[in-house]
Amino acid sequence: MKLQNDLLLRAARGEATQRPPVWLMRQAGRILAEYRAVRREAGSFINLVTNPELAAEVTIQPVDILGVDAAIIFSDILVIPEAMGLPYEMVEQRGPNFPEVIRKASDLSRLRTADPHRDLSYVLDAIKITKSRLNGRVPLIGFAGAPFTIFCYMTEGRGSKTFSEAKKILYSDPELAHQLIGMITDSTIAYLKAQIAAGADLVQVFDSWAGILSPQQYETYALPYLRRICEAITEVPVTIFAKGAFFAREAIGRLPCSVVGLDWNMDIAESKALIPGKTLQGNLDPCVLYASYEQIRRETKNMLTAYGAHPFIANLGHGVYPDTDPDKVRCFIDTVKEHAAMLH
Ligand code: CP3
């Protein structure tokens, strides 16, 4: 099916576009009353994620309500640990929890490499339903967590500021770390390929906890595995978003991916110089959306000006916060849409 709006894909390939495409990480979620209504109907987050009809419905909501240039499939990065044999719970007001965790080599026997068709068919079905209902209006983004970030959750068992249990393993049992991160990588490649076969037009890898590693550890435990993913996914553009990994921008820029995501700590001018020849994505501070409309327009324009003629995809520097006013989100989106194209 031919896409009516292919701005995202053209920008990802580094092609000139009439205007930059815009979408938001975590756009399908609690900022929308319409999401909260479907979420209530589902009863729990996991019920919503595993119900392809409802997942497709909330995936499309931001396209209809906010006017973004892409949909991102409604799911979570934690479906991979579950598919590998480590189920998660989502505790209201607190976040994810894994009743069992991986801490020693013998724990690996509980795990298998995920088979997306057996273990994640609900995501693949949600993608197929979404693609059919979008009917070519905008591209659909598939996603997965980066291997190191998934390793963090599988070993720590819950969110953490430091992920010190996860990092302890890097120091005490590097072999276990490599084995587990390798298994996660194999599962992730199979999963992303299945998402693409089901209809995903671009895939993004979220390395949300990249920023807790030293540059040397990022080199050892993250980059080789991201490289394996990028080399395996040749069907569609790949975006690597490594939150907090300002120190690894040059190395990430050398990966065979199409797009590099920036958070708001990363200066755009500096990032353009460090990551030549790649499309960039981001990076407005999500907290700007708490400011006045005037300030939102000003900060958004500053971001657009900083990119100038460099190919980019407008986005926030991380997921939108749940208590953000959707009208403020619309102000950000409209400001990007009004931005005149600059020739590359
Ligand atoms: O971007 C989108 O709109 C698609 C949906 C999406 C969700 N999670 C839905 C979700 C995406 C892309 C994710 C990715 C994800 N999940 C990441 C990587 C991105 C990032 O933010 O760094 C991470 C680290 C997770 C793990 C996760 N899921 C946590 C830590 C939490 C709890 C914190 C929170 O935001 O509530 C979740 C829950 C979650 N995932 C919610 C949503 C909409 C909220 C739960 C609810 O609606 O009840």
Image (cartoon, rainbow, N blue to C red):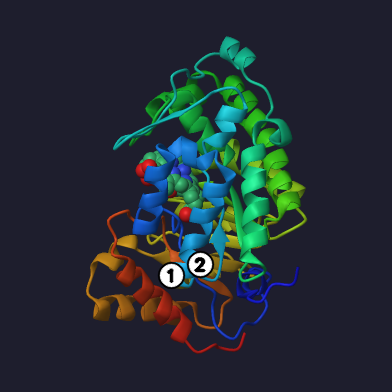
Tell me whether circle 2 and circle 1 mark residues in contact (CB < 8 Å).
Answer: yes
Q: Are there few (<14), some (14-19), or many (20+) residues within 10 Å of tag 1? A: some
Q: Quadrant of the N terminus?
A: bottom right
Q: Secondary structure at mark 2?
A: helix
Q: Nearer the viewer, residue 99 or 326?
A: 326
Q: Amino acid at mark 2?
A: Val
Say above or below: 237 vs 151: below
The residue carrying mark 1 has its beta carbon less than 8 Å from ligand 1:
no
Amino acid type for the residue under numbered disc 1: Leu
Say which residue label 2 marks.
63
For the residues marked 2 and 1, what is the alpha-carbon distance in whole angstroms?
6 Å
Front residue of 131 and 291: 131
Place of residue 270 in the rendered image (x, y in percent of width and height, measured from the top left)? 47, 68
Residue at (48, 24) in percent of width and height: 155
The reply, left or right, for residue 212 in relation to residue 230 is left
* Depicted 217 relative to depicted 200: above or below: above
Identify residue for label 1. Answer: 66
